[in-house]
Each structure stands twice: as structure tokens, then as C-alpha cells.
Amino acid sequence: MLLLLYGNIVFKRLLRYIQIRPHLDFWYIKFIYERSSPLSEMKIASDRLHRLVSRLTLLSYPLEKTEFDTWWIFYLPLKRRRWEVFPEAIAIPVRILRYRNRYFLLMQSIGCIEIAERKDPEVARKEKIGISYIHSGELINITERVIREMYRFSAFIMTNLGILEDIVPYDVRTGKIKGKYVLEDVISKQFADSVPKKIS
């Protein structure tokens, strides 16, 4: 009985993987973006990527629009291997913010990318004070593939809205707290043990 249940789950995952056909690997994208900018957002100055993101945002209505900024949400389809034999198709929420004609891609569990046009005066000002922007190279090409994947997946979501409930993984929805960022002695051990006793 348990084997039949497991086989059913594996079959559903395989069917979803065939339907979605993700081209990018989660661990590869995570490694590339964390390696290039481990502590802050990656800054890219590219007219081509700026046009691609602006074309992508035309596909949906903004979640929130104020005088200064506009928010959208898209999903990036990725394949991820854990302990299974074949990769699993997952989707990562990507929030896109437009602020002062620059786009910020906030990829949950992966990182943040700022995309500006080359002729943006803010780019020249920041480069004068030592904040560098990426103008060409492997990261530009990978970011273009990421944006094109979101574009392709948006058309798929429009016909299959219910699939997002299944393919956004739990660990991505809830996030993770890394142990090195948590204070150890916030409250004493005795007080923590006495709280459940006082409640009951």
C-alpha cells in the first residue's frame, strides 16, 4: 500500500516535470548568484535585460502601484534534485519592483538583482564612487535565460493556475533561518522551560 502511494506521488511529480519542462537548475542558479554577490544585490547595467524585464511586466497587472514604485510577482520554473532519481519541477516566486526606471528582481531563496539601463545617470554616479555594475559576461547571459524562462512560464500559468499550489516548495514558501544569524541567549533556559508550565 505504501509503495503504491509512493509510486503515485512519483508519477505525479514526473508528469509535472514533463508538463513544465524547466531548463534551469535551482542549485546552479543559486550558486552563480550567491558566488557573484554573497552579501548584497547584484547590479547589472544592460539595455537588453532592461527591455526584457519591461516586456515581461507587461504580461500581468501590478500587485501594488504607488507614486514611486510598482510591484509585480512572477514565478521562475527550475529543476531541483534532492534524493530522488529524477529532478523535480519547482517554481520560485520572483517579485519585480520598478523604482526610478530600474528593475529589482527579488528571487526568494536565491538573491536580488538590480537591472538598470546603461545610460542611467545613477549608474555613472555609483560607478564614480566605487560601486560597480556588471556590463557583460556570463551573469548577463544567465540573467537573460532566467527572464526568458519566467516569460515562457507565464504563458503556461495562464492556462494552469492551480499548478502553483503544487510546485512552490514548502521550504521556499516558509524560508529558512540560518543558525549563524540567530542570537543564542535571547531568554534564559529556565524561563523558556517555565513558560509552557505557566500557560497550562
Image (cartoon, rainbow, N blue to C red):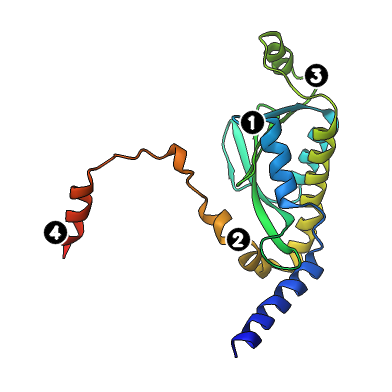
Drawn side of residue 198 relative to residue 53, left or right:
left
Q: Nearer the viewer, residue 113 or 121?
A: 113
Q: Which residue is label 2 attached to?
A: 169
Q: CA distance from mark 1 to mark 2?
A: 23 Å
Q: In the rendered structure, which disc, 3 or 4, sits on the residue that comes first in sequence?
A: 3
Q: CA distance from mark 3 to mark 1?
A: 20 Å
Circle nearer the viewer, 2 or 3: 2
Which residue is painted at 55% across and 57% down in the image? 171
Judge the density around disc 1: few (<14), some (14-19), many (≥20) Cα neighbours within 10 Å: some
**CB within 8 Å, label 1 to label 2:** no
Which residue is painted at 82% across and 47% down in the image? 148
Drawn side of residue 87 relative to residue 100, left or right:
right
For the residue marked with disc 1, what is the amino acid?
Glu
For the residue marked with disc 2, what is the amino acid?
Pro
Which residue is painted at 75% across and 28% down in the image? 44
Measured as percent of width and height from the top left, residue 113 is found at 68, 34
For mark 4, give the secondary structure. helix
Which residue is painted at 74% across and 55% down in the image? 78
Which labelled disc corresponds to residue 119?
3
Q: CA distance from mark 2 to mark 3?
A: 39 Å
For the residue marked with disc 4, what is the amino acid?
Lys
Q: Which residue is label 4 attached to?
A: 198
For mark 1, give the secondary structure. loop
**CB within 8 Å, label 3 to label 4:** no
Q: In this view, which residue lies farthest toward the bottom?
A: 1
For mark 3, give the secondary structure. loop
Q: In the rendered structure, which disc, 1 or 4, sits on the residue that comes first in sequence?
A: 1
For the residue marked with disc 3, what is the amino acid?
Lys
Judge the density around disc 3: few (<14), some (14-19), many (≥20) Cα neighbours within 10 Å: few
Q: Which residue is label 1 attached to?
A: 41
